[in-house]
Amino acid sequence: MLSDDAALVALTKLAFGPDAESLTRVRRDGLAAWLDAQARPDEATDAPGHAALARVRLRIRYPADPDHQQWPATDEARPLALLAAGPDRLWPLNDKQQPYADPERNRPRQEVAAATIARAVSSRWQLREVMVDFWHNHFNVNGAGERAVGVLLPPHDREAVRPQALGNFRALLEAVASSPAMLVYLNNRSSRAGAPNENFARELFELHTMGRDAYLAAEHLHWRDVPGARQGNPRGYVDEDVYEAARAFTGWSISDGAVIAGRDRLGTTGQFTYVAAWHDNYQKRVLAEEYDPYAPPQGDGRRVLDRLARHPATARHVCTRLAERLVGTPVPPALLDRAIKTWTAGIAAPDQIYRTVRAIALAPEFTPSFGRKVKRPLELAASFVRASGIELGVTEGLVGELDGSGQRLFGWGPPTGHPEDVDYWLSANAARRRVSLIVGLADNAWGAGKLPVAAMFGQPRLPAGDALRRVEAQLLPGAALPDRTAAVLSPLGLDAGHQLDAEDPKARRLVAAVGLYPEFQLR
């Protein structure tokens, strides 16, 4: 049996907050058993997640084409239709010569964002959804800032990130490196021999694998000067490594109609393709390893990924990022050491990432770390919906509210991903948007689902003080809370003995007030 407080902490950090079913399971079976049950997500058994996706209706509206009459006026609430679409269906949306209104071209990103919210709220595979969110941030692409990225988001989410979210990092690394959305975002689709583009290679080293702490160019000019390099085990990397890696990835591209040579062109399917004619076939040196010329197709790039995935700096950087997300900052040194050992021991395991997450979650430092981080808007919204029991049907209004909250899903510009810094999420504007998010959900401002106040109260009406205690117990089960009766009820013009009707708008505001408690805002 797990204590109520420990169960609440676990589901706040390892899920998008507790709901009644997950809370019961964690309390009864313990955290280790819950984690192991989450280890191998099975889409076929995720009935709640599928039902949530089926409830989504996103309104799309635009006028008829005024010049060429290529499309009629449209105004409809449309279900999700693009999540299973491949690049060949989606890529034409990026072609300005094709007859599509802008809302249709923007639709893929909006659908993936809506599906992300729906799954965060309803999927039974909560640990996977938390890790999908983590990896999308770690391998950030901006689908709102560049339409070519946005139209490719469905297969990026479905095929590159989700399958390995709890799997093997090396497999995840190649899936992302060959994802058309990433190849467009970091410009590798145009990288070729004689003119390699280093954007992807730079972020691969600095953000995705070894990290900025392993960048030693300020101390060492040449690769051979890096400690350990002459023995074949460099401690870090320098610019030479980035430049050489960029050459290794020349030819990793997408079928976007580009000219290969003469009259030869790539197809226009938007799919990953390796263009042998664009690859730099000559010898290379990356992280003190010599690459012979004329490697097999994609061989140079895959060798770079092999080396990076196994480097100790990658283990430290990625495990630090995982611990910062699941525990907080600063990361306890002993916990980080255990995570790195688990990561390294499972380097070839198909569940390497899961093993590391499990080691972090079962560490003695895990439960006492509650409150070091603030929930980002997606976490805040999803946890409020899950705890209150709203049957959510994601709408374009809710997606738009999250877009304006500072966490624009798949729309963060720099490759760094959304910040983990608490200060960013608690600025004056961010705090105001947090209030509007919770109050809007309570009031069903976006038509996404009605707050079941009567179910939360347990009866149609009861004294306001009792109602507050019931709501606190449901939203923050097991939490030790100070008495806030007067602070919550007085602004609503209520006292503890007032008979509060569940249909009274003040009842919804009472629920929203608990959603704004510091204890609910933190993780």
Image (cartoon, grey):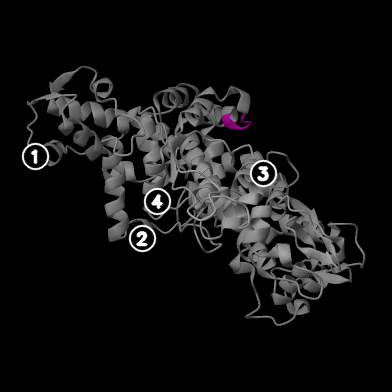
Q: Are marks 1 and 2 in contact (CB under 8 Å)?
A: no
Please name the residue that numbered disc 3 is placed on. 89
Mark 1 to mark 4 CA distance (whole Å): 30 Å
Dot 3 crowding, Cα within 10 Å, few <14, some 14–19, many 20+: few
Q: Earlier in the sequence, mark 1 or mark 2?
A: 2
| Residue 434 drawn at (x, y percent) | 31, 49
Residue on which the image places disc 2: 423
Q: Residue at x 46, y 59 (%)?
A: 419
Q: Quadrant of the C terminus?
A: top left
Type of amino acid under label 1: Ser
Q: Using the numbered discs, state the Cα–Cα distance from disc 1 to disc 2 in whole angstroms.
A: 30 Å
- Residue picked out by circle 4: 373
Q: Which residue position holds label 1?
A: 490
Is there CB contact under 8 Å for labels 3 and 4? no
Amino acid of disc 4: Lys
Name the mark nearer the viewer: 1 or 4: 1
* Amino acid type, residue under disc 3 in the picture: Arg
Residue 197 left/right relative to 499: right
* Viewer-nearest residue: 26 or 149: 149
Query: Depth check: 497 or 221 in front?
Result: 497
Start-end of magenta stretch: 38-42
Whether residues under marks 2 and 3 lie with C-beta atoms below 8 angstroms apart, the answer is no
Question: Which tag is nearer the camera, tag 3 or tag 1?
Answer: 3
Does the magenta-highlighted stretch encompass residue 495? Answer: no
Residue 472, image quadrant: top left
Q: Give the x, y percent position of residue 426.
A: 32, 57
Q: Residue at x 53, y 43 (%)?
A: 112
Q: Decide: is 482 above or below 226.
A: above
Residue 40 among magenta residues? yes
